[in-house]
Image (tube, grey):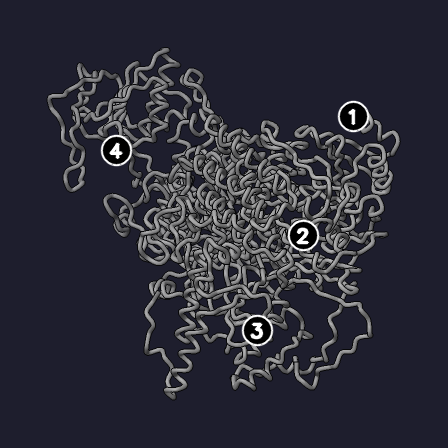
Amino acid sequence: MRAENYQQQSHPPSNQFELNFGPNHPGIEGNYALQVEVEGDVIVKARADGGYLHRGFEKLMEQRLWIQNISLVPRICVPDPSPMEVCYSMAIEEISGIEVPERAQWIRVLQLELSRIAAHLFTFGGHAATTGMYTPMYWGVADRDLILDLFEEFTGGRIYSIYNLPGGVRRELPDGFLDKVSEVIDYIESRLPEYDNLFFRNAVFIKRAKGVGVLTQEKSLEMGVTGPNLRATGLAFDLRRDDPYLVYDKLDFEVVVEEAGDAWARTLVRRQELLQSIRIVRQVVAALPDIGGELRAPIPNPLAWRVPAGESYARVESSKGELAYFVVSNGGEKPWRVHVRGPSAMHAVQVLEELVTGGRVEDVAQTMFSLDACPPEVDR
Amino acid sequence: MKYSDDGSLLRPLRALSFLGRAAVTESLDPRPAADGYRGFHLNQHQECIGCSSCQKICDNAAISMVKVPSLPNDPEKGIRNLRPAIDYGRCCWCALCVDICPTSSLSLSKEYVHTCTQEDIDSYFMLPNEDSMHGGSEYGGGWEKSETSDLLNLDRQPMGELEPEYRQDNFKEIVNGFTPQQALDEASRCVQCGACHDACPTGMNAPEYIRSIYAGDLEQAVRWIYQSNPFSHVCGRVCTHRCEDACSIGVRGTPLAIRWLKRYAMDGVAPERIKELALEQAVVNLLEREFGECSAPVEIVSADIDDAIAVAKTGETIAIIGAGPAGLTAAWDLERLGYHTVVYESRPAAGGMTRYGIPSYRLPYEMLDRDVEIITSSGVEIRYGVEIGKDITLEQLRDQYSAVILAIGLHLGRSTRIPGAEHKSVRKAVELLRLYSENGELTVPRQVVVIGGGNVAMDIARTVARVQRQQYGAVDTTVTALESQQNFLADPEEIKESLEEGVVIKPARGPQECVIKDGELESLRSWGVDSIFDEDGRFAPHYNRSDEQHYPAQMIIEAIGQMSDNQLLSEDITEELEWERGRLKIDSNGRTALDWLWAAGDCVNGPDVVHAVADGHRVAASINDQLIKLRG
Amino acid sequence: MNLSQFEAWLADIDHRIAGVEVTASNLNKRRNRVDLPADKLVLFLEAVKGEASFVHLSAISCVDWIDDGEFELVYHLWSYELNQLISAHIRVSRDPGEYQSIYDLYRPAGFFERDIHEMYGLYFHGAPDMEKFILTEWNGIPPMRKEFDSEEFVEQNFSWQEYNPEWLKELVAEGGGVVIPCEEQRFSRSVATDHGIDQQHSNWSGCDVSSKLCRIDSKYRGGD
Amino acid sequence: MKEIKVENRREGNILSRVFDELNEFCRARSLFILHYCTGCGAIELPPVMTSRFDMERLGVQPMVTPRQADILLITGYVSIKTLKRVMLTYEQMGSPKYVIGICSCTVNGGMYWQSYATAKKLDEYMPVDLYIAGCMPRPEAIISGLRSLIRNIELGESNNWKKYYENYDYYLGNQQKLFGDEWQTPVDVIGEAEHYGLVGEGTYGEHTEILQRVQQPLKPLEMRL
């Protein structure tokens, strides 16, 4: 800007300010923005601004072969990519009537739960860092890395596993892998009390989180809140139990519930879900050696595969909430329409706007991280 | 667990418990990746066949196919010197390219570090080979294709056949053909690499018609087929399928049944409709040649078409000797190029060797008739029963027509010239096959011996076996061949089916004498064969004299090769032409030493239907070029 | 309402609301497909929400059936009591492309309707907010509409790296080089190569000869 | 790490040479990465920042404001909407500044080559110093990349930021192509170029003319509340 073009701005005397939160702001999860109007430091109006991570996934998927999309879908939610693959595969399997072999289903559960643990650890890290506590972030991210090492070993990729194909999984677990899983899971479980001391029972955190961003059960039902955020309002609902997929109906786990519905309760639900996920992984590790059979049902040549005309709505409980894929095939070589319903599409837009309004500026980050909103799911 | 603030001043002391713990920090240098990691690409250049399946599966368009001239390029084996080059500005390391690779040459390594400045951005585009991206092999292999991750279907759909008891005493067609579902499944195995197209002598658009079959559009498949082969009913049954030898699926699995797919397409469309499609195509070809590529889609209006055709016709006439695949293909092409063609055929029906050399259980006459019918309805005139040299001479043809094509096939059998071979009961296979198809019957004795191990030997043996079963209720046909069992020249299916039908096969037997007693043929005396070729690879069989066997026979059939009947050429012409080992010498376009005479088909190439078709195309194009040149 | 009551209720719904068709999924017993005329949707939603406890609007999906000239809107509804999903399908005309909002019934509709408006250009009357959310910098036609060709857009607006590494220069000097560029694969153009591989051959979704077969030279017809 | 090549040292006054070397030596050991997650590659940054791969060993730390940051790390694809913000951010960063493009997407479009919403080649919009291959690159690869950037800085070879001034017209032209002719930023790049003496042949051109023609006094950021 040339100096001569610079125009002196004059604001009316007021204690109302407009603030731009993000996209480049450490208090915002990912590349996302929130425009808020504050009076003093109380937010009177908020508006989410997304699209910074928009890649046009749904358009891209209409342009690619059915199987090519497998490598595309994990990118829709970067911190928790595995449910994306599984859900997309499940949708195709339902349309084309492919039966997934049992062993593959168990391995998928293993993958999903490991991914959930990794995602929750990552969220704690980010959440703590925005509250000003950096050590939990250092711990959370480093411990999550152990799970990423596991992913690297059995899927070939650290973040994006691209491990599922419609019909099953791509390859057998390496030798001795289940022992390693047990080792890592034991380690993470042994770390949980330390996390408690450092973070969940930290006076600073509790004071910052309690009573912030309160969602009543009624309100969350009205606003389409799902996943841990819904369970934090006292409704015991989990797609794994109530709309079971894969082999979750054979597994023993609890649906964790908290009553308060605030940022604190939401964090605690995730904290306890870690334990449940560890429990599930243990059951899978114990059961897998006895489950033999194929890993993948045969699918036609992917270059020529035409999924029969039809549609399906596949739903998976991701670490953020209800993840759904609406897949429509017109019998062609490419999907006719894939609609991704990311859980954060609700949490990061309408719910976030609603929750931060009336709160204080410094609680925006707290609210966003406690909702575990994942912007790429919103933008797609 | 109570999640409440029970803080005390001493809480921070808990941090002391971390004192003895090992740090989680890794070294600054990259760790080795896990086995099966998806890092940069590796490609075994010697195994890769350049089929470009990796390029097709790549969802990021990261793969370009690069020609590497130093590598072998052999279309007949389905090997191209193309290799994938990867753009790491696109790649997402999903390894779908590895999982679809028909040869398993592609894999990913454990190497994952590559950094470069803007100036070196070219290093993002690389041609993977056996070495890792930055040289050296310390990284080792990562993701490789496993049985589960393999995306290709390597097994062919089984082809239904008549069981031996239903086929051994009649001439019904053996092969059932694909059911629609089988055809769909078989077509879906194709990776559209085009190796079949490159290997096919006549360059059939196999990937396209397979795709059309897969799309359920058989008419479209027929259109594709008719672009390069007017003998498709025939080739769908008895083609030597070079395409299947080149098929890239065949590297690790069974190649696609391209021949049966073609047959499926041809059988799946009503004959009248095929005729319409073929003629429509012929007309379009003709008009396009005359008026150039069409730009706007216009409905065909018949009145206009007739005018247009009249304009497109050149008015010149070409004579073709022999109504076999080569001659008729040339005629079909020349008609499409605007010429009139007259085909001289000495026998009462068209088809040449495909009619008189192939038994109808392999190729029903009805199918051949369909092909011939389409060709004749495009305007080709066939004059049956005219023998060149007797009824009309070649010189007359030369004077009457703009050009002459010699496509006389190989209708004479070769003789072993062993003692007794001149006996009247020692016959030639081609001659008997022709007799059978002309008369629909054959008189054979109870015991027959066939000399020769090729497909013709199998054809005659199986024909004789059928006739024997019809006449005597029992088969006693023995095939003796010089080759050992594993080197047999005949197709393995032929041998298998012959054995099922009761033919006895004696491999590695050298015929020595047709034993004649009291003027009647008694048996074939043969010796065991030690080797067929000498060190230089020349034909010089070496026999084991102690291993002598007699095979009783009232008829011995020689099936050791054929030759063309060059009697029809006059002496002058024979002298003007150039010869090479008894065969007419031609240039790559099928032209003989005489500027008005072309030769095509088996008589210059040796026996093969699809080669004959290819020859027909080649000769027609050559004649057209020549005549255009003459016209100025 | 328990599950059997719900089934009876759902079976009966077409008597109360004309034109509703119910299809239960034979693969997943928790899925119910409902097709209904567009003007009956609100009536239907009021009934399922009020009487059958379907309080959760999981998603609204829009499908562009361009050949039919229609958008299909699919409302995915979930009941926390019955653990059942209803997918209500309606069709609205692509032109002028408007429908009514159900924000008053289901608040999540606010986001989905805004998204559909942005991506498909289907306007919802009565929605609280129809402003752009994701595509604020986008001036073209709504990109999810089938007539928008994203590849063409990309080709016009962006360029690609032109790599020329040493190994490629050497190969070109030897007579080799890039034969099938990834661009060709990408944009499904047809190229003849010196290998005789017509690129049309190698793409499943490639060319169409039939159109060629029913063409006659316009030059000839013009001169006729 | 490679040995430092002596012949690459710049010539001139010995005093200024020593000063420059000292300057580069120090600069290379204290780099701040702007904390801006533009794309999915950002998911591998927390491991790099935290204890496992710990980039602080190299003297590299995240920084929240562009004014104090040295490195702009473009973590993968940039959607056009983000690219506008990235440009604003880049121009605000103080020189010398370095741009690292990680992932495939910054080089040639990556996975999103068909997408209408992402920019394909980062170097069309700003000069890039270093690319790290991967989708996404592992933390180790990012560490290796940072190490080679540090080496380049020490050698005085990483001066691509000057290109932005010298070829401003080219970069502006590409930006205008995407954002429209009305595109302008609060930073006076031409003025800065003149000030630093970095005016090159490509600083002025048809696109800067358009900019000067359409340049408006900046309005306060419009809120859509």
User: In the rendered structure, which amino acid carries the disc numbered 4?
Assistant: Arg
Disc 1, SS: loop
Q: Which mark is residue D145?
A: none
Disc 4, SS: loop
Does mark 2 fall on the same chain as mark 3? no
Q: Which mark is residue B414?
A: 4
* Mark 4 vs 2: CB contact within 8 A: no
Q: Which mark is residue A378?
A: 2
User: In the rendered structure, which amino acid carries the disc numbered 1?
Assistant: Asn
User: In the rendered structure, which amino acid carries the disc numbered 3?
Assistant: Met
* Mark 3 vs 1: CB contact within 8 A: no
Q: Residues within 10 Å of mark 4 (few under 14, many from 20)?
A: some
Does mark 2 fall on the same chain as mark 1? no
Q: Chain of mark 1?
A: C
Q: Which mark is residue C2?
A: 1
- The structure residue drawn at horizontal position 42% and vertical position 28%, both measured from the top left corner, is B362
| Quadrant including the N terminus of chain B | top right
Q: Chain of mark 3?
A: D
User: Could you give the CA–CA distance between mark 4 and mark 2, rounded to whole angstroms?
Assistant: 80 Å
Q: Chain of mark 2?
A: A
- The structure residue drawn at horizontal position 60% and vertical position 70%, both measured from the top left corner, is D89
Does mark 2 fall on the same chain as mark 4? no
